[in-house]
Image (cartoon, rainbow, N blue to C red):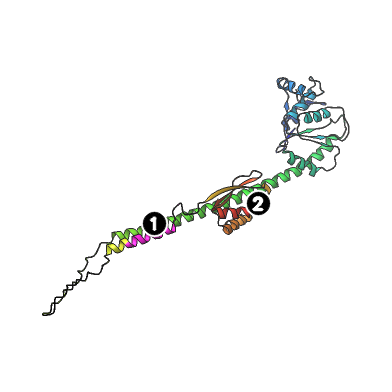
Amino acid sequence: MFDIPSLRGGWCPPGYVDEKGPIGPLAETWHLKALPADVWEEHRGFFESLKLSFNNTDIWAQRTLMNVLDSSGTLTILPEATTDHTNLGIDATMAMKKPLLVLRSFDPHEGTFTKWLQDNNVQVLNINGPRESSIPGINAESKVLFERLFRRAERQERERQKCMEEEERERRELEEQLEREERERQNARREAAEKAAQEMKRAWDQPPAEASPSPVRVPRVVAPVPPVPVVVTPPAPVMTPLMQAQAAGANIAAALMASHPAPGGEESDVTIHVQVPAQRVKDLLGVQGRNIKAIKSQTGVLKVGVLDRNDPANVEIVGTAKAVEHCRSL
């Protein structure tokens, strides 16, 4: 049984032995663990419930069953029929309903093996196969096959990790840009409000000037002309500096209210979540976030962000209802 990242681990019979005798140095190199009797007794009832054909005192059968149990999938090398515990490993894997891949030859199987690993999400791989005494030469042939299989699997895993790191970097850059744009908008709104408040304060703080008296017309009486009614013309209204400041303040307030409508009159922002297949997230982002920036600029939404790395991935869109629907359609 192998842990894919390190290719090491698994159970071996008590005493660290194989069919030829002690394997102490090999067991240490491969991080093999001798199977204790109490661990076997703890699981024996489970194996017996599977109705498998095995001798519960056979240390080789115990080793085979425990490795199947502790793995998430089994790869079996079986170029020809054998009577050792290889068949027990196949039967146990099927009885436990775990992924099983049987290779009947040593021909290249890189594509089949890698696809099987990915399709079944095999994280801990159990390798099952005949002993050297059952099929002479199988050890050397298997070693060459494993080197070929795992070399490709490791290469693809490195490529996948590199792709994920690049996508994560692009996602962070895009989020940082969106945060910068939001900060700039908030700063602009704050500066406009502060400027308007300062202008209003200056208008109110200006001292009023003395108003000059308005002229009064006195009618001229000419005798002996009949009396003429006295007509007094009221003085024309004068805008004092205080009245001018009040009018200016009212105009500024009206302008602020026009540029910031009441909550009931403006179109409020909405937030929706859409799902995108994981393999298409990179296409959505584009190189250095160019695609998602273009979508945001074209539709006028406030935010478009990838929230996670699930499959499908969740994407959040924030903006007016019309802008959000346009963005969703793109």
Label placed on residue 194: 1
Q: Position of residue 288 (x, y in %)?
A: 61, 55
Question: Residue at position x 58%, y 59% from top?
Answer: 298
Q: Where is residue 18 in the image (x, y as percent from the top left)?
A: 80, 26
Asked which secondary structure carries label 2, the reply is helix
Structural distance between the alpha carbons of marks 1 and 2: 42 Å
Asked which secondary structure carries label 1, the reply is helix
Is the residue marked by circle 2 packed among few (<14), some (14-19), or many (20+) residues within 10 Å? Answer: some
In the rendered view, would you say 209 is above or below 35?
below
Amino acid at circle 2: Lys
Quadrant hosting residue 16: top right
Q: In this view, does 1 lie to the left or right of 211?
A: right
Question: Residue at position x 68%, y 48% from top?
Answer: 279
Residue range of the region highlighted in magenta in the rendering: 247-266
Quadrant hosting residue 103: top right
Give the foreground label among 1 and 2.
1
Does any portion of residue 162 appear in the rendered image?
A: no
In the rendered view, would you say 249 is above or below 317?
below
Quadrant hosting residue 101: top right
Does any portion of residue 115 appear in the rendered image?
A: yes
User: From the image, which quarter does the C terminus lie in?
Assistant: bottom right
Q: Earlier in the sequence, mark 1 or mark 2?
A: 1
User: From the image, which quarter does the N terminus lie in?
Assistant: top right
Q: Is residue 253 left or right of residue 42?
A: left
* Total labels drawn: 2
Amino acid at circle 1: Glu
| Residue receiving disc 2 | 282
Is the residue marked by circle 1 packed among few (<14), some (14-19), or many (20+) residues within 10 Å? Answer: few
Q: Where is residue 287 in the image (x, y as percent from the top left)?
A: 63, 55
Most prominent secondary structure in the magenta stretch?
Answer: helix
Q: In this view, does 289 lie to the left or right of 202?
A: right
Q: Where is residue 84 in the image (x, y as percent from the top left)?
A: 85, 27
